Image (spheres, rainbow, N blue to C red):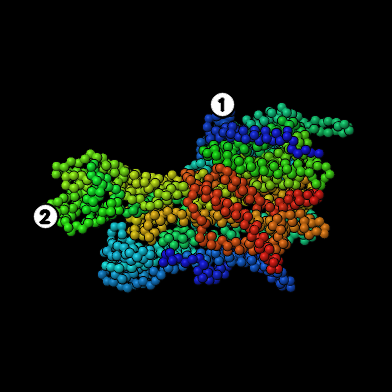
């Protein structure tokens, strides 16, 4: 379901949003958005003036147009919110489809009863067998089963879920493919992760995030300033009119004042604010991350320390052979060949990587070993070696090859009277120091050399960390390795710090330390013992494969269980905040041009010389707009249309680049600050030309 | 015919600015030592005074206060000052040190004056020489000159502690701050300046007004008084309330070019230096300098426009004479420089009548007031007002770097935004509402000395000056009338305390927060980009709020003047 995500011009969403724009005109709804509430009240006042005129037998086309555009302004803002909700809902609907009408087999002592999934209570035990849909989030308390989680992850390969350990959590809506498990329900219906997520995008339960509240206060304050500035204006105007001895030289009628007010108050950001918030969460869902609160998404933007597990995030899952280092006087090719032979039957990832490396480096293919009689010696904890014995057809031993830990191979060689070269010992030590694992290869009494096994750092991860550093985010690698190994990998991956031989307690302690120093910490985790750290972290992303405890402790769940995604989550959080800031700046910068349109329109006639219609303030009409009416109308139309024009930006978010704050600020100031200053001058002028051309003013 | 700014005048201007900037680190650094309670040389001669005051008042200077305790004491301290000053004025006729035989001050004027001096506004709806007794001048007005200036600094100190302390519940000790500020900063500086001014001929005496006979044979009273000491604190403490009605245009307040230069310097010295003090106290001088340059650029830009306007030929006149109302002894440049200095700071003393400035220069003076006295401003008050703008700037633009906005590692959240906006809006609301009312009421219009847009400017200027606690007068307006006295009192009190309380609340809220260490992801609050941003926000907030009003006042007057029409 995920990446087939609907584009924002989906017609069904558009239709619904169109309808919702009108439903949202309900004053109780508008009250939640003070800027739009003021606009709505202004539109209503203007409407009253219009009808008063009509009742007096006087129709004013100018007031009609103003009134209509004021209503459009509110409608456009509603439309933006409805669009964002529509997209979120579409996403949620796809998730919810997974949850339709499941029945559960609830255990009552020894008996089973069939109940509808929503009726399940916390702590109920339910049975699921092959083919059953798991009725709710829970924990496996008995049995083991493979589960198809593709409904929520999109990943088709089934996963194993078993009681006890770190793989006990199951998600409602997924399907058991084989075997039988007993599940203890851990989330009440309507409380599960998915339900919370759906509520988040649907608006009903949507709570404003701290930062949204702060911005909301700023917008209310700006609105208050402009209400003062606009409604004190008639008094100054009447004084001026009297002083100039010109009756009716100023136009401070209610529709004009309302127009000025609506143009000045931050309608652009006020109208798009909730859309920005919803689409931020929506972007997370599109990446298969479920958040329990909008607050968590915002916190992600603030995070400046990432705790990353080494395995899976920084390195590929397993250690791999990266090099063959021959002993003195031995050809590398011989070493590679012997190593490959010894590993042919070794099914561990390390073993396979040796075969692959030999093939890649020297073109040595898996030989037909049927020609020789080969006996494979599997790895055992006693010998700490594995290998192969090759026999001639007559049964005489040809050679025996061993690979294993240096100490074991040394003992084996020496027990046969062979010698262990000091060079090899040196190589072994060097590899260990560099964070690798050395495997010594020997044939009969001769040491051939060393295979270097290493954690392979994921491609591109170093660059990613460099970007994070530039953005002021520190990365800390968490690993169970010893400090030496950890330091080597940390250096190779380019992380800023590492925590070696880490235990869950150490993780928790580290998070607390970072937080005490004023940092905000994000981490991923999956095991039950990660739960305290996940809860302590400012952003805790639980892997979907993790335990229920881990998932409850974190404030996000990654359905793909991909720890690298933490970085994307941080980026989405930042982008959300940036979009808000950019549109606020744009909105405020717009006001300058609007003053230059409306003030001369209101006062152009003031102190005009006899016989002239233009007084001194006409000089402020720097856009040389056609008439006072066309000027006011153009400003109001621009103010309404800009909301529509910016909906795509609000939904997609501003372009995000991983750069230092100073650079990001400079770019965004140029685009949204300076752009916001200039754009309306152009826009208002163009609209003025248009409405004059079609004789609307 | 007036020349363009002569090279001598220009040289003096440059010398003045360089001296101001040069003195900043010295005075600012020394104040930082005093405010942080570190050891400094003045403790040797004056330390006994500090200790004596603590002992007399039974104060433990190390006792820490929460922001609300601190705020309560600020309010109580100011209320007592208000009542004392009010009482003195209402009873001065019966009290000693009244050789000129001044009668008791009328209630409306007394309340207005008490509000004015307690709030550091020093708006004067009276003329000192024929209203106030020597006792009222010294024990009432003079004392409040000290305490109102110190109050401004003390509130700033609490805010600085809020910014620098980590998860703390307290913001300092009010009494320690007040005493240190008064004893080590204000008193010594005033002592030096008073002596310097007296040497130039500023009067300092308790004798009665002598009577002279003019050439025409008429008899004339020459007002005197203990002026030099009063004028020193008037300039140093950004008070601005003159001893005489003509303020620093009076030859006994400002007799020579040197006294003029010293008084000018004293206007800006502490408000500028304390910005450096701030940098030292927050542990990063660049933070101080960035704010300093933002203030400086706004000041210089306004000064440039005003000078340009003053040296333009006046199209309404045949001659190119703009000298009416200027300080003719010291020249146009010194009048305009003083007008700009006194309006960017909340000083408000004048050596020329702002009513007589060209429309644009008068508009610059008014706009300086309307910016909220954040460009240097009053000592302490100017910087804390600017810090409110910093908070708004950081919040507006800070989001654009993709983090919850923070300043000096402190997260700026809903509470700080709310308090900042209350503090920024309250004075502006007073200006707009009371001016609108004045335009509406007969009483408001009747007090005007001029008609047309100039009349509107008089109203706007009066309330801009009072609401922002500046106290300079445009002139022309009859301020000693019922509406302006009472509305003005309310405006001054709101303009002062509706800012102080939110500032202290912010101090308390910030003190309780953690400090996020800076990183490349931190929004930079130093450097040219931030300076430009801060200037833009200050100007945009000012312009957006007052552009309509200003367009009907100074702007339209300027445009009309271009067509030869004056008021």
Say which of marks 2 and 1 sits in front: 2
Q: Secondary structure at mark 1?
A: helix
Q: Secondary structure at mark 2?
A: loop
Q: Which residue is mark 2?
A: A395
Q: Which residue is depicted at the point 29% across and 51% down? A: A361
Residue A126 image point, x, y percent: 31, 68
Say whether residue B467 is left or right of residue A1.
right
Q: Where A3 falls versus A489 (above or below)? A: below
Chain letter for mark 1, please.
B
Question: Gap in Å between the C-alphas at discs 2 and 1?
Answer: 105 Å
Q: Quadrant of the N terminus of chain A?
A: bottom left
Q: Which residue is depicted at the point 23% across and 42% down? A: A329
Q: Quadrant of residue B225?
A: top right
Say whether residue A432 is left or right of residue A196.
left
Q: Which residue is depicted at the point 65% across and 54% down? A: A592
> Disc 2 vs disc 1: Cβ atoms closer than 8 Å?
no
Q: Nearer the viewer, residue A394 or B235?
A: A394
Residue A530 visible here = no
Q: Where B125 falls versus A269 (above or below)? A: above
Q: Quadrant of residue B145?
A: top right
Q: Nearer the viewer, residue B139 or B330?
A: B330
Residue B162 image point, x, y percent: 52, 43
Q: Which residue is mark 1?
A: B44
Q: Which residue is depicted at the point 53% across and 71% down? A: A15
């Amino acid at each position: 379901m995920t990446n087939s995500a609907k584009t924002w011009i989906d017609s069904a969403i558009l239709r619904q949003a169109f309808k919702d724009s009108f439903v949202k005109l309900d004053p109780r709804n508008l009250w939640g958005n003070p800027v739009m509430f003021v606009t709505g009240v202004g539109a209503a006042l203007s409407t009253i003036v219009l009808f008063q005129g009509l009742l007096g037998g006087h129709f004013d086309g100018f007031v009609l147009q103003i009134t209509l555009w004021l209503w459009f302004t509110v409608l456009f803002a509603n439309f933006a919110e409805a669009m964002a909700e529509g997209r979120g809902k579409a996403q949620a609907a796809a998730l919810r489809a997974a949850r339709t009408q499941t029945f559960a087999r609830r255990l009552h002592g020894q008996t089973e009863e069939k109940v509808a999934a929503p009726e399940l209570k916390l702590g109920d035990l339910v049975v699921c067998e092959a083919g059953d849909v798991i009725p709710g989030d829970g924990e496996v308390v008995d049995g083991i089963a493979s589960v198809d989680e593709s409904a929520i992850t999109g990943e088709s390969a089934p996963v194993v879920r078993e009681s006890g350990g770190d793989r006990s959590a199951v998600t409602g809506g997924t399907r058991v493919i084989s075997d039988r498990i007993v599940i203890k329900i851990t989330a009440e219906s309507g409380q599960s992760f998915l339900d919370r997520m759906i509520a988040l995008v649907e608006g009903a339960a949507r709570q404003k995030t701290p930062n949204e509240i702060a911005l909301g206060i700023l917008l209310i304050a700006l609105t208050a300033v402009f209400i003062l500035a606009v409604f004190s204006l008639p008094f100054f105007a009447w004084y001026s009119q009297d002083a100039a001895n010109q009756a009716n030289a100023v136009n401070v009628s209610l529709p004009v004042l309302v127009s000025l007010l609506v143009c000045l108050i931050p309608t652009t950001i006020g109208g798009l604010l909730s859309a920005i918030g919803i689409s931020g969460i929506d972007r997370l869902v599109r990446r298969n991350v479920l958040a329990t609160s909008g607050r968590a998404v915002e916190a992600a933007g603030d995070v400046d320390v990432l705790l990353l597990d080494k395995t899976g995030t920084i390195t590929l899952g397993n250690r791999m052979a990266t090099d063959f280092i021959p002993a003195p006087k031995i050809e590398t090719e011989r070493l590679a060949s012997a190593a490959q032979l010894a590993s042919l039957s070794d099914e561990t990832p390390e073993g396979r990587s040796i075969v692959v490396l030999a093939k890649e480096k020297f073109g040595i293919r898996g030989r037909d070993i049927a020609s020789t009689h080969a006996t494979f010696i599997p790895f055992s904890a006693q010998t700490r070696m594995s290998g192969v014995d090759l026999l001639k057809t007559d049964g005489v031993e040809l050679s025996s090859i061993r690979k294993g830990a240096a100490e074991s191979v040394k003992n084996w060689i020496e027990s046969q009277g062979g010698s262990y070269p000091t060079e090899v010992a040196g190589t072994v030590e060097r590899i260990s120091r560099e964070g690798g694992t050395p495997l010594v290869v020997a044939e009969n009494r001769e040491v051939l050399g060393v295979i270097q096994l290493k954690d392979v750092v994921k491609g591109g991860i170093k660059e990613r960390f460099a970007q994070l550093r530039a953005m002021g985010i520190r990365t800390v690698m968490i690993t169970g390795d010893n400090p030496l190994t950890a330091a080597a990998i940390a250096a190779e991956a380019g992380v800023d710090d590492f925590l070696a031989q880490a235990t869950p307690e150490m993780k928790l302690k580290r998070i607390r330390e970072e937080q005490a120093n004023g940092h905000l910490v994000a981490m991923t985790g999956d095991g039950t013992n990660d739960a305290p750290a996940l809860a302590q972290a400012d952003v805790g992303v639980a892997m979907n494969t993790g335990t229920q405890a881990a998932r409850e402790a974190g404030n996000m769940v990654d359905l793909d269980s991909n720890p690298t995604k933490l970085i994307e989550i941080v980026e989405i959080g930042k982008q959300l905040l940036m979009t808000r800031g950019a549109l606020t700046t744009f909105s405020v910068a717009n006001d300058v041009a609007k003053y230059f349109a409306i003030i001369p329109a209101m006062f152009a006639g003031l102190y005009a010389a006899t016989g002239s219609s233009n007084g001194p303030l006409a000089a402020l009409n720097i856009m040389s707009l056609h008439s006072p009416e066309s000027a006011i109308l153009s400003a109001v139309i621009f103010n309404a249309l800009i909301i529509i024009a910016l909906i795509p930006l609000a939904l997609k978010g501003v372009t995000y680049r991983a750069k230092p704050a100073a650079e990001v600020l400079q770019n965004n100031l140029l685009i949204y600050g300076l752009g916001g200053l200039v754009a309306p001058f152009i826009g208002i002028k163009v609209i003025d030309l248009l409405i004059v051309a079609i004789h609307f003013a | 015919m007036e020349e363009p700014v002569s090279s001598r005048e220009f040289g003096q201007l440059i010398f003045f600015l360089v001296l101001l900037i040069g003195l900043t680190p010295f005075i600012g650094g020394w104040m930082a030592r005093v405010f942080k309670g570190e050891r400094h040389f003045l403790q040797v001669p004056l330390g006994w005074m500090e200790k004596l005051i603590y002992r007399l008042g039974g104060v433990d200077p190390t006792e820490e206060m929460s922001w609300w305790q601190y705020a309560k004491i600020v309010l109580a301290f100011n209320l007592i000052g208000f009542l004392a000053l009010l009482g003195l004025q209402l009873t001065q006729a019966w009290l000693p040190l009244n050789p000129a035989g001044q009668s008791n001050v009328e209630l409306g004027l007394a309340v207005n004056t008490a509000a004015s001096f307690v709030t550091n506004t020093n708006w004067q709806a009276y003329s000192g020489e024929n209203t106030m007794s020597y006792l009222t001048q010294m024990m009432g007005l003079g004392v409040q000159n000290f305490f109102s200036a110190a109050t401004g600094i003390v509130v700033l100190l609490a805010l600085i502690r809020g910014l620098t302390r980590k998860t703390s519940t307290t913001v300092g000790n009010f009494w320690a701050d007040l005493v240190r500020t008064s004893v080590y900063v204000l008193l010594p500086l005033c002592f030096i300046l008073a002596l310097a001014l007296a040497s130039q001929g500023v009067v300092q005496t308790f004798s009665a007004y002598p009577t002279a006979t003019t050439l025409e044979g008429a008899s004339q009273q020459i007002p005197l008084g203990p002026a030099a000491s009063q004028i020193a604190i008037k300039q140093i403490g950004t008070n601005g309330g003159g001893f005489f009605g003509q303020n620093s245009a009076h030859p006994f307040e400002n007799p020579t070019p040197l006294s003029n230069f010293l008084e000018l310097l004293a206007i800006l010295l502490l408000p500028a230096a304390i910005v450096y003090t701030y940098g030292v106290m927050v542990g990063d001088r660049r933070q101080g300098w960035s704010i300093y340059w933002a203030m400086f650029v706004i000041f210089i830009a306004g000064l440039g426009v005003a000078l340009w306007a003053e040296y333009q030929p006046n199209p309404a006149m045949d001659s190119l004479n703009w000298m009416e109302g200027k300080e003719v002894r010291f020249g146009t440049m010194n009048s305009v420089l003083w007008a700009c200095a006194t309006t960017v700071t909340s000083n408000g003393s004048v050596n020329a009548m702002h009513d007589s400035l060209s429309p644009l220069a008068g508009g610059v003076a008014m706009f300086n007031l309307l910016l909220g006295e954040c460009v240097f401003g009053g000592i302490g008050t100017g910087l804390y007002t600017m810090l409110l703008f910093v908070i708004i700037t950081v919040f507006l633009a800070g989001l654009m770097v993709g983090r919850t906005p923070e300043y000096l590692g402190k997260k700026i959240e809903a509470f700080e935004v709310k308090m900042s906006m209350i503090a920024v809006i309250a004075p502006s609301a007073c200006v707009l509402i009371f001016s609108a009312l004045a335009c509406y009421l007969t009483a408001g219009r009747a007090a005007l000395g001029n008609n047309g847009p100039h009349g509107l400017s008089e109203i706007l200027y009066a309330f801009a000056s009072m609401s922002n606690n500046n106290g300079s007068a445009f002139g022309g307006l009859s301020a000693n009338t019922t509406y302006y006295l009472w509305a003005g009192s309310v405006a001054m009190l709101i303009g002062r305390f509706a800012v102080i309380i939110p500032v202290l609340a912010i101090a308390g809220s910030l003190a309780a927060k953690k400090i996020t260490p800076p990183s490349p992801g931190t929004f930079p609050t130093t450097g040219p980009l931030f300076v430009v941003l801060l200037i833009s926000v200050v100007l945009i907030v000012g312009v957006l709020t007052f552009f309509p009003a200003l367009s009907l006042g100074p702007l339209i007057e300027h445009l009309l003047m271009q067509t030869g029409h004056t008021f």
